[in-house]
């Protein structure tokens, strides 16, 4: 009932404004033009943009590929598919299971409910934008640290189709196909796209004599767009993902080689998801009104893991999860330019997370059941004044109410039965103020300050009552940047710096036996810089650089269970730095070559700073040809076969990808 009332409110309230006196204002738009050289954002914000052509040229087909190309953005692959993945921006992050996201993901104006539901296959994309700062007034879902905004290709009256084939190391094979066009000219359009990929496993199990992480993944998207008039745009989108990862790609840290395991249990890991989204956009003479309704269901079943990865399977875990989320978002903005610009919106989401967890250890069998409900109500807006030449001022504001309810029980052969039914509610306002000034068409400076929050919540799968609830995280975020181009735009530079003062920073806490919780570090500070440059050495030859540095420390943190002092330690899952240097040659006749060097700094995986991955670098190479209807690429990634771990947990670690090479053929018609 609350969901229905909120939808009615969001649709009726803006309608009253639509009938109000007209005001001439600037619309908020997203640019999706194609480019023929690497993009370089010139707007007064700390963000990066990538378009369809360069996504192909950079080989950006997975979520992990995004973070390699963006300074101070990191995606931690926990080797569990989308489960427990973590998105970190300038030190702000989600915990792997319990907390709300710090970085939100949008696809065609639809928000992913949480990091675990984002399955990570990128295909049929027109534009991808990464915001490195909080966006309280731009999106309905709370973009506490930043956002990734993805726009897929939209159909028109011309019938278009494409097929791409990939073949590579470890018997890798992939097929991507898409088609779009008009069913009724100028009125009704369709879009279909699908992706398949599979490969043999990187790991070798010497005890079972197999490759346990052999994968096979499917994704599909279908959309209908109806435009009964120039004032209406109605889009229905359906998606489906079905991923079989084989197993959790963990090996013991004491193994002589990172890709060998002796696990005696036949592990399994499968995930699937589907979504249904309805986007309705209406234009009047003075306003734009957009309504987005979405439903997403995500499931992980089965997930069977050997906890000690030894030949005798004495410790194991059989876990089943599912997440179902409904969202409603509306946005109202002006159509025409003027001295003032604004956006108003409302957002609602309701989600249910279910978990059944069976943990077998010597002398004990523990069964956990969890039913967690979360609701989020929000109103948000942005107001900007651009009536002074070269000077823009803006303010964002959002108000969130988040309510969580948990029904969880534990039945253990050694500890008996324990049931908990806690609730947690929080309300918070997130203001942001910003200014930018353009010295000339070649130089601008921008600065922003504001307060953001990530709601607290409730944890499950633990037997410690003091660890069930964690508090909201708040931060005072400050940033400044300058963008310049030099020598007739042959050299472009972006420099940004930030300082975040964080209270009650949310930290994941691991207990024995597969139990987790989230604790709060009372005081944490994060500061750093980003430097990006693009230099046209000669015609068609470009040198790119991207450098991000983050210094984040616990200024005050004592474990509330053990009392251990972690003050001065580095917050986990935040690389000290990440850099990218790329040399790209692109000839007008279609010849293309790109060499990339990625370097990631020291990264810790727990609050003790005992588990960590030292700095490492990876070199990738891509050569291709694209002209007319045909494209062909040859690639090799991790040329030096660098060994590194994407995460570590206890005695286990997840090795990163070894050297892989392949070819991609594309036919467009």
Image (cartoon, rainbow, N blue to C red):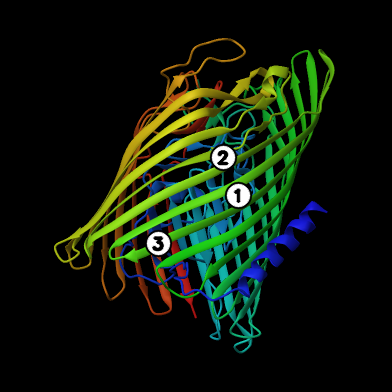
Packing grade of label 3 (10 A; few <14, some 14-19, many >=20) is some
Residue 10, image x, y percentages: 69, 61
Mark closer to the chain start, 1 or 2: 2
Name the residue at the left extreme. Answer: 487
- Viewer-closest of 517 and 161: 517
Residue 525, image x, y percentages: 41, 28
Looking at the rendered structure, the secondary structure element under dot 2 is: loop
Q: Which mark is residue 213?
A: none
Residue 191, image x, y percentages: 61, 74
Packing grade of label 2 (10 A; few <14, some 14-19, many >=20) is many
The residue wearing badge 1 is 118
Packing grade of label 1 (10 A; few <14, some 14-19, many >=20) is some
Q: Is residue 81 above or below residue 566?
A: below
Looking at the rendered structure, the secondary structure element under dot 3 is: strand
Quarter of the image with the N terminus in it: bottom right
- Viewer-closest of 378 and 82: 378
Looking at the rendered structure, the secondary structure element under dot 1 is: loop
Mark closer to the chain start, 3 or 2: 2
The residue wearing badge 2 is 85
Instruction: Look at the numbered discs 1 and 2 and tell me whether their residues touch, using CB distance below 8 Å.
Output: yes
- Viewer-closest of 410 and 147: 147
Q: Is residue 5 above or below residue 145?
A: below
Residue 102, image x, y percentages: 53, 42
Q: For the residues carrying marks 3 and 2, which lies nearer the camera in this image?
A: 3
Residue occupying image coordinates x 68% and y 41%:
402
Q: How many marks?
A: 3
Residue occupying image coordinates x 62% and y 13%:
561
Horizontal side of residue 619 vs 56, given as left or right? left
Q: Which mark is residue 385?
A: 3
Kindly report the distance in space between the C-alpha atoms of the residues bearing marks 1 and 2: 9 Å
């Amino acid at each position: 009932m609350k969901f229905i009332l909120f939808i009615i409110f969001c649709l009726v309230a803006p309608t009253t404004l639509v009938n109000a006196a007209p005001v001439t204002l600037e619309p908020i738009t997203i640019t999706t033009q194609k480019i023929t050289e690497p993009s370089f954002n010139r707007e007064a914000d700390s963000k990066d943009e990538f378009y369809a052509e360069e996504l192909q040229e950079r080989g950006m087909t997975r979520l992990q590929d995004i973070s390699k190309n963006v300074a101070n953005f990191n995606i931690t692959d926990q080797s569990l598919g989308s489960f427990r993945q973590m998105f970190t921006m300038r030190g702000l992050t989600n915990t792997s299971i319990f907390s709300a996201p710090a970085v939100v993901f949008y696809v065609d104006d639809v928000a992913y409910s949480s990091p675990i539901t984002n399955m990570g296959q990128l295909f049929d994309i027109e534009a991808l934008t990464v915001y490195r700062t909080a966006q309280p007034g731009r999106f309905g879902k709370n973009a506490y640290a930043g956002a990734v905004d993805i726009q897929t290709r939209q159909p028109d009256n011309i019938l278009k189709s494409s097929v791409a084939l990939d073949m590579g190391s470890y018997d890798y094979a992939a097929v991507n196909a898409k088609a779009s066009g008009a069913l009724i000219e100028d009125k009704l359009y369709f879009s279909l796209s699908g992706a398949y990929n599979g490969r043999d496993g990187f790991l070798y199990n010497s005890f079972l004599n197999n490759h346990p992480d052999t994968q096979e993944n499917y994704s599909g998207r279908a959309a209908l767009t109806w435009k009964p008039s120039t004032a209406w745009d109605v889009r229905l989108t359906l998606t489906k993902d079905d991923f079989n990862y084989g197993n959790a790609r963990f090996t013991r840290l004491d193994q002589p080689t990172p890709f060998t395991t002796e696990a005696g249990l036949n592990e399994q890991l499968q995930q699937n998801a589907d979504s249904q989204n309805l986007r309705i956009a209406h234009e009047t003479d003075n306003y734009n009104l957009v309504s987005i309704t979405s439903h997403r269901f995500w499931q992980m079943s089965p997930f069977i893991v050997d906890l000690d990865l030894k030949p005798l399977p004495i410790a194991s875990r059989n876990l089943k999860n599912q997440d179902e989320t409904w969202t409603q978002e509306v946005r109202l903005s002006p159509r025409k330019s003027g001295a003032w610009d604004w956006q108003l919106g409302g957002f609602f989401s309701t989600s249910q997370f279910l978990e059944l967890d069976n943990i077998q250890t010597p002398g004990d069998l523990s069964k956990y059941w969890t039913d967690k409900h979360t609701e989020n109500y929000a109103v948000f807006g942005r107001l900007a004044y651009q009536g002074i030449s070269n000077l823009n001022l803006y303010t964002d504001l959002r108000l969130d109410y988040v309510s969580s309810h948990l029904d969880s029980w534990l039945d253990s052969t050694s500890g008996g039965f324990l049931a908990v039914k806690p609730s947690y509610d929080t309300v918070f306002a997130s203001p942001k103020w910003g200014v930018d000034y353009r010295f000339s068409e070649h130089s601008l400076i921008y600065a922003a300050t504001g307060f953001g929050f990530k709601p607290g919540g409730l944890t499950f799968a633990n037997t410690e009552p003091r660890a069930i609830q964690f508090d909201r995280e708040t931060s005072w975020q400050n940033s400044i940047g300058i963008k310049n181009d030099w020598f007739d735009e042959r050299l472009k530079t972006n420099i940004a710096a930030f300082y975040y003062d964080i209270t009650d920073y949310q930290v994941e806490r691991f207990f024995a036996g597969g139990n987790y919780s989230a604790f709060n570090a009372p005081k944490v500070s994060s500061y750093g810089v980003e430097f990006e440059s693009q230099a046209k050495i000669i015609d068609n030859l470009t040198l790119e650089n991207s450098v991000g540095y983050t210094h984040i420390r616990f200024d005050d943190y004592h474990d509330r269970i053990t009392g251990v002092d972690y003050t001065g330690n580095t917050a986990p899952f935040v690389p000290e730095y990440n850099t990218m240097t790329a040399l790209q040659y692109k000839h007008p006749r279609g010849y293309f070559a790109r060499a990339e060097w990625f370097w990631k700094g020291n990264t810790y995986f727990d609050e003790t700073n005992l588990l960590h991955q030292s700095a490492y670098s990876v070199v990738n190479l891509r050569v291709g040809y694209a002209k007319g209807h045909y494209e062909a690429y040859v690639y090799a990634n991790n040329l030096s076969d660098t060994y590194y771990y994407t995460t570590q947990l206890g005695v286990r670690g997840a090795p990163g990808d070894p050297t892989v090479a392949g070819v991609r053929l594309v036919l467009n018609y």
